[in-house]
Image (cartoon, rainbow, N blue to C red):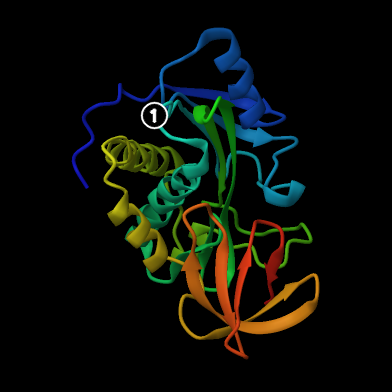
């Protein structure tokens, strides 16, 4: 990637508590139009949201709960999945500094082997056929020792490494990676972004169990289409394509 050079220094707004950092930042952007990569960091969320409407468990002051804004007005709406790729890659590649086994579970969860360490919710606003604003809300488990929700497979970086980490240092490094990828995206250097994303996918090799509206099946991962659809090949050799929420991984 080219060095980060074209985006202003990141403005981090730290707050003790909010219902949702995405909501907080959305309101802020409507009122003030702060610079790109303005980031809201909360010690605690009362109503943090993930994909599929799930809540996100995070002990107060132990993890990273943040949202950041981009305004990719150069990007057509049909290519919005590239934003998901650059944000998930930025987090996955930062976590690679702490050990092996990290991957991106389509579309943008981050896993350590079979356990989930990070979830995100990306909300895009459109003007015509282009994206006017993109807010990425991210929950990244850093120093939590125990999890109490019904989520089946959470894990934190402390549980993985056996050491406490400094959340804000990790945040700044992640934001710098997003900024660097964003420069690449703006310059239309998307081929390498997509290659990196595909190389980083969860369960990239072999046959694995899934379930869709017709029931359980086993398939291998072929890739992800430019619009974000997951492409699988089942035991019969048939290719299956799924939009988000149309198929689930089985553990």
Residue drawn 80% across and 75% down?
Answer: 214
Q: Position of residue 191 (x, y in %)?
A: 30, 54
Q: Is residue 241 left or right of residue 177?
A: right
Q: Is residue 183 above or below residue 244?
A: above
Q: Position of residue 134 (x, y in %)?
A: 52, 31
Q: Position of residue 243 (x, y in %)?
A: 64, 58
Q: Is residue 237 left or right of residue 12?
A: right
Is residue 54 visible from the viewing direction of this image? no
Q: Is residue 20 left or right of residue 6?
A: right
Q: Position of residue 212 (x, y in %)?
A: 75, 71
Of 9 and 167, the residue lying toward us: 9
Q: Is residue 140 above or below residue 43?
A: below
Of 37 and 234, the residue lying toward us: 234
Q: Residues within 10 Å of mark 1 (few under 14, many from 20)?
A: few
Residue drawn 52% across and 76% down?
Answer: 221
The residue wearing badge 1 is 74
Q: Quadrant of residue 231?
A: bottom right
């Amino acid at each position: 990637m080219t060095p980060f050079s074209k985006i202003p220094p990141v403005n981090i707004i730290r707050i003790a508590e909010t219902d949702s950092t995405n909501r907080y930042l959305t309101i802020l952007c409507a009122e003030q139009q702060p610079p790109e990569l303005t980031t809201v960091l909360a010690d605690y969320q009362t109503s943090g949201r993930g994909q599929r409407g799930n809540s996100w468990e995070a002990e107060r002051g132990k993890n990273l709960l943040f949202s950041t804004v981009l305004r990719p007005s150069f990007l057509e709406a049909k290519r919005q999945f590239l934003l998901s790729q650059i944000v998930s890659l930025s987090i996955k590649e930062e976590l690679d500094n702490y050990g092996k086994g990290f991957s991106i579970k389509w579309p943008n969860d981050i896993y350590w082997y079979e356990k989930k360490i990070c979830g995100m919710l990306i909300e895009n606003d459109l003007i015509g056929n282009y994206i006017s604003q993109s807010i990425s809300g991210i929950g990244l488990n850093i120093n939590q020792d125990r999890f109490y929700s019904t989520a089946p497979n959470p894990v934190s970086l402390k549980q993985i490494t056996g050491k406490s980490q400094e959340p804000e240092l990790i945040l700044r490094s992640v934001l710098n990676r997003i900024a660097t990828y964003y420069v690449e995206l703006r310059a239309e250097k998307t081929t390498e972004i997509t290659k990196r994303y595909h190389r980083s996918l969860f369960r990239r090799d072999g046959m694995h169990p899934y379930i869709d509206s017709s029931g359980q099946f086993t398939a291998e991962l072929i890739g992800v289409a430019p619009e974000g659809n997951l492409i699988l090949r089942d035991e019969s050799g048939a290719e299956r394509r799924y939009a988000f929420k149309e198929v689930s991984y089985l553990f």
